[in-house]
Amino acid sequence: MKELLEKFLSDSMTKEEQEEFRALLAREDLREEWAAYIEKILAEKRYDDAPVADRNAIFQQMMSKSPVYPYPISTLHRYGWWAAAAVLLLLLGAGTLWLQKPVPPPANLVVADVAPGTTKAVLTLANGQTVPLDSAGVGSWVQGNTSVHQSGGLLAYSGAATYNAISYNTLTTPHGGTFRVTLPDGSNVWLNAASSLRYPTSFKSSSERLVELQGEAYFEIAQNAQQPFKVKVNDQTTIVVLGTSFNINAYANEGGIATTLFTGAVRMNHGNEQATLHPGQQARTGLTTIETIQNVDTAQVLAWKNGLFDFHNATLPEVMRQLTRWYDIDVVYEGNIPAITFDGKMDRHLQLSQIIKIFSYMKLNCRLEANKRLVVLP
């Protein structure tokens, strides 16, 4: 097995060895042994001395063979994302596709490619002035006693010990954009694409720290038992916090609000209903109810913040909604929506053409048109 793996990684297999390799990959009883070999290769950091340009070329070559993460990769990140990706894509990804004997992808489906999202947002100041932000920007603004500083993809607030007047800023990410903000109390918020956060430029004169969210965000809240932190999602739903980390998915087209707790404790108020969460739990709202889900896959919930798509048990519409927000595209279906369930991880930095190639191996055909319109074909 080890010799075959080495030949596979060096692309020096004969046809007979490829057949033997495929057969060994298919054996469930050898899965742990394969995993041990992968760990050994990653532990040796065999590729770490390669120049960045060579690493990128290697990774693109892997992607051209099989741009799919068919198995969990979180435990491999300590070796470097690209090293883990290289081995898993080349070994497990390509091996899985070989076993499935995929039909070659249809030609001429991509008219014009679409790049993935980037770090960008728009800051709306209290006076209505708008400031575009991106990963290269550096700047400062003063609002009353509060200073605002941008450095790359981070917007940070700092202020005086007292502040009488309350003014509000709004940070908005477009489709295809993410951004991070450090609020005046030191709390950190990461905004996903197509989201907005409205917040005061100082919390000093209030008995609570109240912000308003649309879309999705991950929060790490600075502890202050005397001044509870609250996230208002809509007129019915508020999340109350003391000091904790949590994620809120409140996109209007996701059919409800999902609050997932990582550390600490939060309470979700929805109409006349309440639910208190503990780490690893998620609360989902219905029209008038709250459902509490135990033992949530928190890594999947936070995949967007860590630069990944995690499509475990995701339906085609669920996948397409994520792609719509991240690539700023319109998705339409010709005919019925295919009943497909996805399972796997992908890097959020892929070109959309690479995503379409993945779909083709699943016998899901799409056409990407010049006006950023993705058509799902019957």
Image (cartoon, rainbow, N blue to C red):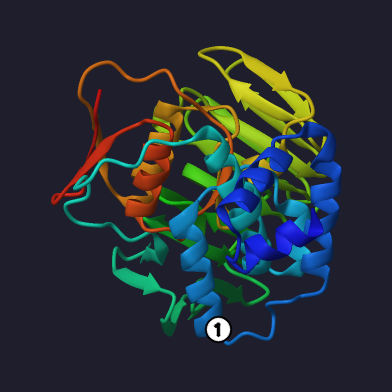
Which residue sits furthest top? 288
Amino acid type at image mark 1? Val
Which residue sits furthest left? 370
| Residue 236 left/right relative to 329 | right
Image x and y of residue 180, in percent: 54, 64
Image x and y of residue 307, in percent: 56, 57
Residue 2, compared with residue 215, is above or below; it is: below
Q: Which quarter shows the C terminus?
A: top left
* Residue at point 56%, 49% (across, down): 94
Please rate how many residues cluster around mark 1, counting C-alpha atoms within 10 Å: few if below 14, some from 14 to 19, many from 20. few
- Numbered disc total: 1
Residue under label 1, please give it: 52
* Residue at point 74%, 76% (across, down): 46
Viewer can see residue 65: yes
* Residue at point 42%, 18% (across, down): 339
Q: Nearer the viewer, residue 135 or 103?
A: 103
| Residue 325 left/right relative to 60 | left
Residue 308, compared with residue 320, is above or below; it is: below
Viewer can see residue 206: no
Image x and y of residue 91, in percent: 65, 53
Image x and y of residue 324, in percent: 34, 42
| Residue 95 left/right relative to 362 | right
**Secondary structure beneath label 1:** helix
* Residue at point 53%, 41% (across, down): 97
Residue 91, compared with residue 40, is above or below; it is: above
The quadrant where residue 161 appears: bottom right
Q: Nearer the viewer, residue 108 or 171?
A: 108
Residue 166, compared with residue 311, is above or below; it is: below
